[in-house]
C-alpha cells in the first residue's frame, strides 16, 4: 500500500506545486491522477520515487518511509517502482536491448554493468519483456529508429525489467495519437490485472480515465480537489476541476 | 563474395569499395598506406645535420616488426570484404591505435619519469613564482663613498671623500694594502636600517663585502640611533689579473642604504608589464579592426555563389580561396617572424602578422556566411537591374551583418590570446618581455607576466561577452 | 501636440561612446605602430625601401629546398706557360665550362685577361694559379653573371714560372651538381619534423582526452552541481579550466621546457594542458546540453550515479566528444608547428633554426610542409566528423 500524507512541495523559486496532498493507494489499484497542466501531477508522481524532494510530508510504501530513505535504501525503493514518462526518456543512440536492460541497473553490480556484462538471465528477461510489448524483433535497432508508440512500449519493457510492484506513469500517452494511446494503456491495464502491479497514472482525457481507472484523484493548483470513482466524474465535476472554459476532449474520437 | 575478398586481397579496401562501402574501403587503404609509410620512415637512418635533433626511434631495424600490424589489418580486410556482418570494426581500430600510440610515444619522446626526477627544478621556481614582481615597497636608495689607494704609494697619497644624499663616509687611513684592516665611519644614515658595504674595483666593478665568518652571506651593518656607523673591514683583493698589483690604484668603498618611504610603487618589471599589456591590447585591437576590414572585400571574392557567373570571376574565386587557405594554415607567430625580419622588432610586426592571419581566417568564415545566405533577395535585387556592387550592398550585406559581427567578436578573443605571445618572436606585447624573463630565469617577473596575461584575457573575454549580449 | 524633445541623454551617451572608441583607437594606434623601438610613420609604409627586404624573402619561401643533386668539386685548369715557350701552350676547350686567357702564354709580370664561359651563373668563384710544385697561389674572387660568364685581369707572377718543363696553370674550382635529382637534406629534416609534430599532437590530444573526459563531468551543472560539495567542485573545476584556457600553449611550453628540458615531450605536456582546458569546457557544455529525460528515467529505476552517467549520459555525448577530439587533434597539429619555437621538437624547432640562421629556402620547405599537413588534417578531420555525427 502507498500512503501519501500531507505532502507539500515548494520549488526553490517559490512555486507551490503541492499543498497538503494526502491519499492512499491500495495494492492492485489503477489510480489515475487528473488535473490541468501545471496542477502538480508530475511533481506528485516524482515525489513518490523521490526524483523530486518533497518539502514536507511523508510517503509510506509497504510500511517503508520513502521520504526518509537515503542512498542504497532509496535505490532499493526505486528499483521496485517502475516509471514511464511522457517523452519516453529512452537513450536514443543506444539499442532497444540496452535501453531495456538498463531497467536492471538497480539490481546488478556497478562494475559489471559499466563494462556491459549482463547475465544470460537478464538478457532472457529483457527479450521476454520485449516480446510482451511486441517488439522482440527490434531488439538490436537503435531506439531513435522507432516510432513514438514503439518507444513508449520499450519504456514499458524497461519498467518491467525492474519487476516492479508499482508503476508510475506520467502522462504516458500525451505525445501519442489516440489509437496508440489505447494500446499503451492496454499494456498497463494488462500488467495491472495479470501481475497485480499497482499503477499510478496521470492522464488528460476523460474518456481514457473512464475506461482504465479504478479510482481517480484530481489536483487543482497543487491541492486534491476530488477523490473517488471514475463514474463520479460527470460534466459538472469536470468543469469544476478543469475550470469553466474547459470542454471535454475525447481521446477516442478525433475532437 | 569470393570475388570481393580477392579484390581486397590484391588491394586493401578494393572489395569494400566495389561493394559500395566506399568510405570504408578508402579508409582501409589510407590506414595501410600510412602504416607502411611510417614503417619506412622509422627504418631509414636519420642523416643528422646541424639543425636537426636526433630522433631516438629512427633507423632501428626492430621497427620492421611493425609490419605485423598492416599485415593483420590486410587479413582482416579480406575477411571484412566477404562477411562485413561478422568482421568486428574494433579489431583494426585497436591494432592501429596500438601501433600509432606506441610509435607516437617514441617519436614524441614521452618520458613521464622525468617529471618526477626533475621536480627539484620546479621547487626552484615555485618560491619566486609565488612572489610576482609587479610592485615593490617604496624606498629611497642613498649612498656615499670614500676613495683610497691600494696598495699605499711611496709618497703621501691624496684621498677624496665623495658623497651624495648626505651620507658622509670617512676612513682612518688614506690608503691600505690588500688584507689590511681599516675602520670606516659613516654619518647621516637612517637609524636602525641595514647598510651594505660595497667595494668598487679599479675598473669599476662592484663587489659587496662578505661576512668574515660566513663568506656566502653579504655584510649588512646596523647604524646606531643617531645614524652613525663605525665598523672595520679588510681590504679585499679586487685588482684584476693582468694589472701590476704593486701599482697603487684608486678603489672605493661604497656605503649604501635603502630607506623605506612607506607605501608601494611599481617595480621596474611592473612598468614593463604595464607597457606589455598596453601593447598587447593595442595590437589586438588594431589587428582585429584592420583584419576585419581586410577580410570583408576578400570574403566576397571568395564566395562561390557570387563569383560563379563567368570563367573570369570563377578564376578569381579559386585564386583568392587558395591564398586564404594557405595563409590561414600558417600560424600568426610564423607570419610574425617574417614581418620582424622585414619591418624590425616591435608591436607593428606583430600587429601586421595577426592582421594578415585575421584576414585569411575571417575571409574564409565570412565567405562561408555569404555562401549560406538566402538567394531570394539577391535574385530580386538583380531583377531590378542592379549591378554587382548594388546587389552586394542591398541583397547580401543586410543578410550577413549579424554573423559577421559574431565572427569578428570571436576573432577578437583569439587575437587577444595571440597578441600575448606574438612577442616571443619579437612581435611586441607582453610576450616579448615574458620570453626575455624566461631566458634570464627571472621567475618573479615571469609569474607577474602570467598573472597579467590571465587578467587581460579574462577581462577581454568579459568585454566581448558583454558586447555579444548587447548585439544578440 | 508639441514635437517630442530630442533625447538629450541618448545624444550624450552616443557622444561619450564615440569619444571613448576614438580614444581607444588613438591609444591602440600609438601602441602598435612601433617598429625597432621608434614610432612608425604610416607614410613610411608606402615606401618601397621598407618592403624591399620582403621580396627576396618571399622568393626564397616560394622556392623551397626540396631536391638537390650531389655536389662534386670540379677543377677547371688551363696551362699558361710563363715565360712563353717554356712549355707547350694550353688549348682552351671549344665548349662547356672553360677558361679562356687573352694570351696563350705570358712573360713574368705580364697582365692579361681571363674569361670564363658557361660556369655556374651568379656564383662567387676564386681564380688561382696552380704552381708547377702542385701547390696553388690564390688570386682574386670573381662573380659570374647570369650566363655564367666572367672576365678578370690576371697577373703572371714570377712564382708561376715553368719548372722542369711543367707549366703553371690558371684554374677555378666549381661546385658541380652530379647524378640524379634526389630529395635534399632539408626534405628529410622537414619530413622528420612533420611526423614528430603530428605525433606530438596525437599524444597530447589522447592524454588530454583521458584527463578532460572525467573532469568535464565535474564541470557540468546537470551532473555535479548538487549540494554544497557538488557546487564547490563544479566551480573549482570550471575556474581551473578557465584559467588554463587563458594561456597559449607556447607560454606554458616555456615552463615545461625548463622542467623536462627542451624537446618534443615539453611540447606535448604544454599542448596537453591547454587541450584539457579547452576540451574540458567543450565536453562539459556537451554534457549540459543532453536530453535530461533518460537521466530521470534511469534514476527512477534505482540505478546509482555512476550507472546513470554511463547509461544515460555517455551514449548521448559520444558523437559530440568524437567530433571535438578530432577537431582538437587538428588544432593541435597547428599549434605544435610553433610550439617547437620555445619547447623544442617538431617542425617548429627546425623552422626557428632556419629562420634564425637565414636559410630561407629551407624555412620555405618547412612552411610548405606545414601548409600541406594542416590542409590534410583539416580535410581528414572534416571527413571523419561528417561521417561520425
Ligand atoms: N523545476 C521547477 N522549478 C520551479 N517550478 C516548477 C518546476 N517544475 C514545475 N514547476 C511548477 O510547479 C507547478 C506544477 O508543475 P507540474 O508538476 O509539472 O504540473 P503538471 O505535471 O500537472 O503539469 C507548475 O506551476 C510548474 O510551473
Ligand atoms: Mg506534467
Image (cartoon, coloured by chain):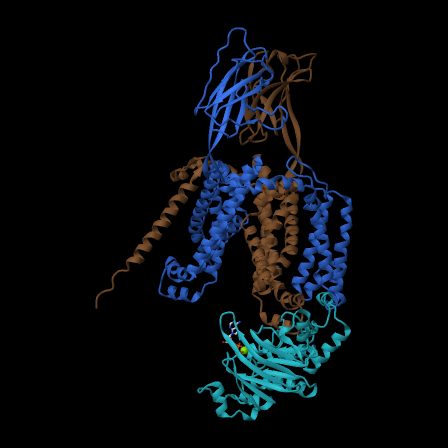
Residue B154 shows in the view: yes
Q: Which chain is cyan?
A: A
Q: Is residue C4 left or right of residue B255?
A: left
Residue A78 location (% of width, % of height): 66, 75
> Is residue B13 placed above or below A208 in the rendered structure?
above
Q: Is residue C368 left or right of residue B75?
A: left
> Is residue B454 placed above or below B269 in the rendered structure?
below
Q: Is residue C99 left or right of residue B467?
A: right
Residue B362 location (% of width, % of height): 48, 53
Q: Which chain is blue?
A: B
Give the farthest residue toward the front. Answer: B225
Choose between C63 and A124: the one closer to the eye.
A124
User: Which corner quadrant holds the N terminus of chain A?
Assistant: bottom right
Give the farthest residue toward the left. Answer: C1
> Is residue B295 placed above or below A149 in the rendered structure?
above
Q: Which chain is brown?
A: C
Choose between C174 and B243: the one closer to the eye.
B243
Residue drawn at 74 percent across, 42 percent down: B59
> Is residue A233 placed above or below C260 in the rendered structure?
below
Residue drawn at 70 percent across, 85 percent down: A195
Residue C302 location (% of width, % of height): 67, 72
Choose between C271 and B150: the one closer to the eye.
B150
Residue C359 shows in the view: no
Amino acid at each position: 500500500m502507498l500512503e501519501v500524507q500531507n505532502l507539500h512541495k515548494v520549488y526553490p523559486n517559490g512555486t507551490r506545486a503541492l499543498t497538503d496532498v494526502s491519499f492512499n493507494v491500495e495494492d492492485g489499484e489503477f489510480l489515475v491522477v487528473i488535473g490541468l497542466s501545471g496542477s502538480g501531477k508530475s511533481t506528485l508522481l516524482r515525489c513518490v520515487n523521490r526524483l523530486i524532494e518533497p518539502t514536507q510530508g511523508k510517503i509510506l510504501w509497504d510500511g517503508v518511509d520513502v521520504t526518509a530513505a537515503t542512498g542504497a535504501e532509496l535505490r532499493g525503493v526505486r528499483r521496485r517502482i517502475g516509471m514511464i514518462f511522457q517523452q519516453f526518456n529512452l537513450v536514443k543512440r543506444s539499442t532497444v536491448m540496452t535501453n531495456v536492460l538498463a531497467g536492471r541497473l538497480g539490481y546488478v553490480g556497478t562494475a559489471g554493468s559499466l563494462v556491459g556484462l549482463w547475465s544470460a538471465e537478464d538478457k532472457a528477461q529483457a527479450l521476454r519483456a520485449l516480446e510482451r510489448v511486441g517488439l522482440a524483433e527490434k531488439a538490436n535497432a537503435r531506439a531513435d529508429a522507432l516510432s513514438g508508440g514503439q518507444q513508449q512500449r520499450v519504456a514499458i519493457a524497461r519498467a518491467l525489467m525492474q519487476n516492479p510492484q508499482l508503476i508510475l506513469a506520467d502522462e504516458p500517452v500525451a505525445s501519442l495519437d489516440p489509437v496508440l494511446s489505447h494500446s499503451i494503456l492496454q499494456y498497463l491495464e494488462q500488467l495491472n490485472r495479470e501481475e497485480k502491479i499497482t499503477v499510478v497514472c496521470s492522464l488528460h482525457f476523460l474518456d481514457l480515465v473512464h475506461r482504465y481507472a479504478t479510482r481517480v484523484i484530481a489536483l487543482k493548483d497543487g491541492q486534491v480537489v476530488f477523490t473517488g470513482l471514475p463514474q463520479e466524474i460527470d460534466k459538472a465535476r469536470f468543469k469544476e476541476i478543469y475550470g469553466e472554459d474547459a470542454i471535454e476532449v475525447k481521446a477516442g474520437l478525433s475532437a | 563474395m569470393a570475388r570481393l575478398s580477392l579484390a581486397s586481397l590484391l588491394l586493401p579496401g578494393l572489395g569494400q569499395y566495389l561493394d559500395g562501402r566506399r568510405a570504408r574501403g578508402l579508409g582501409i587503404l589510407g590506414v595501410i598506406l600510412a602504416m607502411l609509410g611510417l614503417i619506412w620512415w622509422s627504418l631509414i637512418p636519420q642523416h643528422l645535420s646541424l639543425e636537426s635533433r636526433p630522433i631516438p626511434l629512427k633507423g632501428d631495424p626492430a621497427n620492421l616488426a611493425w609490419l605485423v600490424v598492416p599485415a593483420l589489418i590486410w587479413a582482416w580486410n579480406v575477411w571484412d570484404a566477404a562477411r562485413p556482418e561478422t568482421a568486428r570494426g574494433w579489431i583494426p581500430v585497436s591494432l592501429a591505435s596500438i601501433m600509432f600510440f606506441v610509435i607516437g610515444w617514441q617519436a614524441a619522446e614521452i618520458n613521464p619519469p622525468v617529471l618526477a626526477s626533475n621536480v627539484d627544478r620546479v621547487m626552484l621556481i615555485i618560491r619566486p613564482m609565488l612572489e610576482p614582481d609587479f610592485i615593490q615597497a617604496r624606498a629611497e636608495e642613498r649612498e656615499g663613498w670614500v676613495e683610497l689607494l691600494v696598495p699605499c704609494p711611496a709618497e703621501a697619497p691624496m684621498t677624496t671623500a665623495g658623497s651624495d644624499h648626505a651620507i658622509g663616509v670617512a676612513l682612518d687611513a688614506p690608503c691600505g694594502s690588500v688584507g689590511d684592516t681599516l675602520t670606516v665611519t659613516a654619518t647621516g644614515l637612517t637609524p636602525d636600517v641595514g647598510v651594505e658595504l660595497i667595494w668598487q674595483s679599479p675598473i669599476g666593478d662592484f663587489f659587496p663585502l662578505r661576512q668574515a665568518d660566513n663568506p656566502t652571506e653579504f655584510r649588512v651593518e646596523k647604524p646606531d640611533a643617531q645614524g652613525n656607523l663605525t665598523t672595520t673591514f679588510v681590504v679585499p683583493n679586487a685588482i684584476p689579473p693582468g694589472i701590476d698589483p704593486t701599482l697603487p690604484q684608486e678603489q672605493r668603498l661604497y656605503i649604501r642604504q635603502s630607506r623605506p618611504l612607506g607605501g608601494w610603487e611599481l617595480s621596474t618589471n611592473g612598468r614593463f608589464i604595464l607597457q606589455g599589456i598596453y601593447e598587447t591590447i593595442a595590437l589586438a585591437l588594431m589587428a582585429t579592426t584592420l583584419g576585419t576590414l581586410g577580410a570583408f572585400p576578400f570574403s566576397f571574392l571568395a564566395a562561390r555563389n557570387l563569383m560563379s557567373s563567368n570563367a573570369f570571376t570563377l578564376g578569381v574565386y579559386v585564386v583568392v580561396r587558395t591564398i586564404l587557405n594557405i595563409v590561414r594554415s600558417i600560424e600568426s607567430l610564423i607570419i610574425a617572424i617574417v614581418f620582424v625580419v622585414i619591418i624590425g622588432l616591435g608591436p607593428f610586426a606583430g600587429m601586421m602578422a595577426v592582421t594578415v592571419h585575421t584576414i585569411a581566417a575571417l575571409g574564409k568564415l565570412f565567405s562561408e556566411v555569404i555562401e549560406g545566405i538566402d538567394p531570394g533577395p539577391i535574385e530580386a535585387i538583380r531583377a531590378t537591374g542592379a549591378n554587382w556592387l548594388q546587389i552586394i550592398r542591398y541583397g547580401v550585406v543586410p543578410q550577413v551583418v549579424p554573423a559577421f559581427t559574431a565572427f569578428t567578436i570571436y576573432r577578437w578573443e583569439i587575437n587577444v590570446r595571440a597578441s600575448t605571445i606574438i612577442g616571443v618572436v619579437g612581435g611586441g606585447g607582453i610576450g616579448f618581455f615574458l620570453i626575455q624573463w624566461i631566458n634570464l630565469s627571472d621567475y618573479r617577473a615571469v609569474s607577474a607576466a602570467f598573472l597579467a596575461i590571465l587578467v587581460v584575457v579574462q577581462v577581454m573575454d568579459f568585454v566581448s561577452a558583454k558586447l555579444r549580449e548587447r548585439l544578440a | 501636440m508639441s514635437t517630442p524633445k530630442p533625447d538629450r541623454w541618448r545624444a550624450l551617451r552616443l557622444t561619450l561612446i564615440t569619444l571613448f572608441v576614438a580614444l581607444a583607437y588613438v591609444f591602440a594606434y600609438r601602441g602598435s605602430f612601433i617598429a625597432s623601438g621608434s614610432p612608425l610613420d604610416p607614410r613610411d609604409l608606402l615606401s618601397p625601401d621598407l618592403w624591399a627586404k620582403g621580396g627576396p624573402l618571399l622568393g626564397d619561401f616560394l622556392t623551397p629546398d626540396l631536391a638537390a643533386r650531389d655536389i662534386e668539386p670540379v677543377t677547371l685548369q688551363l696551362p699558361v706557360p710563363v715565360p712563353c715557350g717554356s712549355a707547350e701552350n694550353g688549348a682552351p676547350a671549344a665548349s662547356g665550362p672553360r677558361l679562356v686567357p687573352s694570351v696563350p702564354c705570358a712573360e713574368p709580370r705580364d697582365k692579361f685577361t681571363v674569361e670564363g664561359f658557361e660556369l655556374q651563373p651568379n656564383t662567387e668563384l676564386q681564380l688561382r694559379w696552380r704552381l708547377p710544385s702542385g701547390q696553388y697561389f690564390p688570386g682574386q674572387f670573381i662573380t659570374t653573371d647570369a650566363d655564367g660568364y666572367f672576365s678578370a685581369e690576371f697577373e703572371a707572377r714570377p712564382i708561376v714560372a715553368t719548372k722542369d718543363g711543367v707549366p703553371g696553370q690558371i684554374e677555378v674550382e666549381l661546385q658541380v651538381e652530379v647524378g640524379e635529382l634526389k630529395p635534399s637534406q632539408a626534405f628529410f629534416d622537414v619530413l622528420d619534423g612533420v611526423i614528430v609534430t603530428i605525433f606530438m599532437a596525437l599524444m597530447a590530444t589522447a592524454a588530454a582526452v583521458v584527463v578532460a573526459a572525467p573532469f568535464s563531468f565535474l564541470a557540468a551543472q546537470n551532473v555535479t552541481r548538487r549540494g554544497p560539495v557538488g557546487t564547490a567542485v563544479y566551480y573549482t573545476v570550471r575556474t581551473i579550466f578557465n584559467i588554463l584556457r587563458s594561456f597559449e600553449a607556447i607560454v606554458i611550453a616555456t615552463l615545461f621546457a625548463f622542467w623536462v628540458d627542451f624537446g618534443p615531450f615539453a611540447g606535448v605536456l604544454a599542448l596537453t594542458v591547454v587541450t584539457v582546458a579547452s576540451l574540458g569546457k567543450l565536453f562539459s557544455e556537451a554534457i549540459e546540453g543532453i536530453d535530461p529525460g533518460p537521466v530521470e528515467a534511469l534514476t527512477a529505476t534505482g540505478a546509482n550515479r555512476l550507472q546513470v552517467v554511463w547509461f544515460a549520459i555517455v551514449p548521448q555525448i559520444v558523437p559530440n566528444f568524437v567530433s571535438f577530439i578530432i577537431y582538437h587533434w587538428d588544432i593541435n597539429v597547428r599549434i605544435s608547428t610553433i610550439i617547437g619555437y620555445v619547447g623544442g621538437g617538431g617542425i617548429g624547432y627546425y623552422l626557428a633554426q632556419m629562420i634564425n640562421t637565414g636559410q630561407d629556402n629551407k624555412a620555405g620547405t618547412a612552411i610548405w610542409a606545414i601548409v600541406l599537413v594542416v590542409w590534410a588534417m583539416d580535410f581528414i578531420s572534416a571527413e571523419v566528423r561528417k561521417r561520425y555525427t
